[in-house]
Image (tube, grey):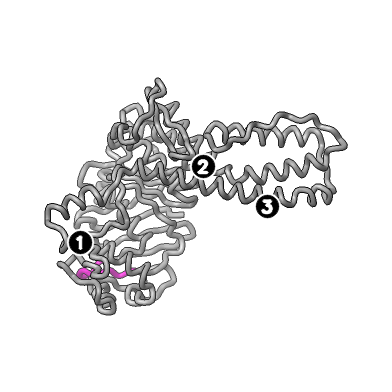
Amino acid sequence: MLTSIKIEKLFDIFDYDITFKEEGITLLTGPNGYGKTTVLKILDALATQNGFFFVRLLFEKITLKSSGDDFITLEKINNEVLIKAKHQLNPIRWSIKSLEKVLKDLPFFRAIDENRWMDRRTDEIYNADTLLQKVIIEFPELLEELKFIRFPKMPVVYFIREQRLLYPVPDNRMRAKQRSFFESQLDNDVSAFRKTIEEYAKDLRDTIKETLAKSSQITQQLDSSFPRRLFDQARGISENEFNQRFEHVKSIQRALAEYGLSDIKEDSHPTFKEENAKALCVYLDDTEQKLAVFSGLLDRLKIFTDILNERRFTFKRIDISKEDGFKFSTSQGKSLVLGDLSSGEQQEVVLLYELLFKVKPKTLVLIDEPELSLHVVWQKQFLDDLFKIVALQDINVVIATHSPQIINNRWDLTVDLEENFQCESI
């Protein structure tokens, strides 16, 4: 777990010593220009092994510490970054020349200018950051020159950026030679991006389909072996255990029906008879296995829909659907197109969806300005809802914010960069 980050001479000005909060949520505050977003980008670049971000960043030294006294330091000397970790004797050096050496073995990448390259195979355009990521994925055997220290305690990072409402289409390719300048710009502005809320509705639809398919597979396997296992069953079940487990099964079935994920009616409560104890035990074992595949999904759907329906939207309602993923309607029951939601409503849906469905456990989540387009009342409720998500997802969160309403009454979670800089300067 990360415990602190110390940054010396960020932008040749600021010295920060930031300790992350044990509660799992750290709020970075301060005036514009103090580098709140840059701190998030530093954490993201460390986790994604993006040395070229630090080559271009103006700083002198960065030290990141984790529990167990593990650390990694980055020192900037003459446009070269020296990276060193605990127990590592010789620092690794990064510079723009490092990437240029690797590209000599990949002649289909052609330099357009000092920070843009074109892949001649596809006509895709890359900057130093995105090109590095492509090389890491496609040509790992060439990366000895770019080898980066693996920080032993650095978690996976998920960065929720300020621009959240547009979703980049990964297979979009810029073919400037085949288009006029105007057409290229139009493509870049429209075709290269889709509305994130629409993409996430499709993503949830696919998740539901995959979960239903997995449940169906488990059901077929169990049903095919049910007679044999019934005859082989040696253990019975008490009436008290049966009642408790059966009530739990019914609660899951009710939730599935509520979200439209099952057409199976809730089982009526059978009368317990001692002579049927073995058969009832097999039945419950099988039913619990069939339903277990839905447990994580149902927990996330409940928080997702409860926050939006009970605490956010007054005249609209979100519903879960096997066909649509999620959809919205008015309080009078009239269907709404996802794009008809206001920017604030879309921000809320997208942010909640990413936290609940895109982020994996043990992830360090970075959120830039969660207050964007959100009503003041929603901002005040944000931290209460986030704590529920942090507990469910087992994540840590670092937030850059300008909003006192987001902070609400939790000033104990804040690190004020202006105050931190002044303390470090004394």
Q: Residue 141, located in which quarter of the rendered image?
A: bottom left
- Dot 3 amino acid type: Gln
* Of the pair 81 and 190, the residue shown nearer to us: 190
Q: Is residue 78 magenta?
A: yes
**Residue annotated with mark 1:** 175
- Dot 1 amino acid type: Arg
Residue found farthest to the top: 332
Residue name at image x 70 percent, y 49 percent = 222
Residue found farthest to the right: 275
Residue found farthest to the bottom: 105
Q: Is residue 333 visible?
A: yes
Range shown magenta: 76-83
Q: Residue 357's x, y, as percent? A: 45, 45
Q: Earlier in the sequence, mark 3 or mark 1?
A: 1
Please, is residue 90 above or below residue 33 in the view?
A: below
- Dot 2 amino acid type: Leu
**Residue annotated with mark 2:** 392
Q: Residues within 10 Å of mark 3 (few under 14, many from 20)?
A: few
Q: Residue 6's x, y, as percent? A: 33, 56
Residue name at image x 41 percent, y 62 percent = 71
**Residue annotated with mark 3:** 221
Q: Secondary structure at mark 1?
A: loop
| Secondary structure, magenta segment, majority class | strand
Q: Secondary structure at mark 2?
A: helix
Q: Secondary structure at mark 3?
A: helix
- Tag 3 and tag 1, C-beta contact below 8 Å: no
Q: Residue 136's x, y, as percent? A: 35, 68
Q: Nearer the viewer, mark 1 or mark 2?
A: 1
Please, is residue 404 above or below residue 80 in the view?
A: above
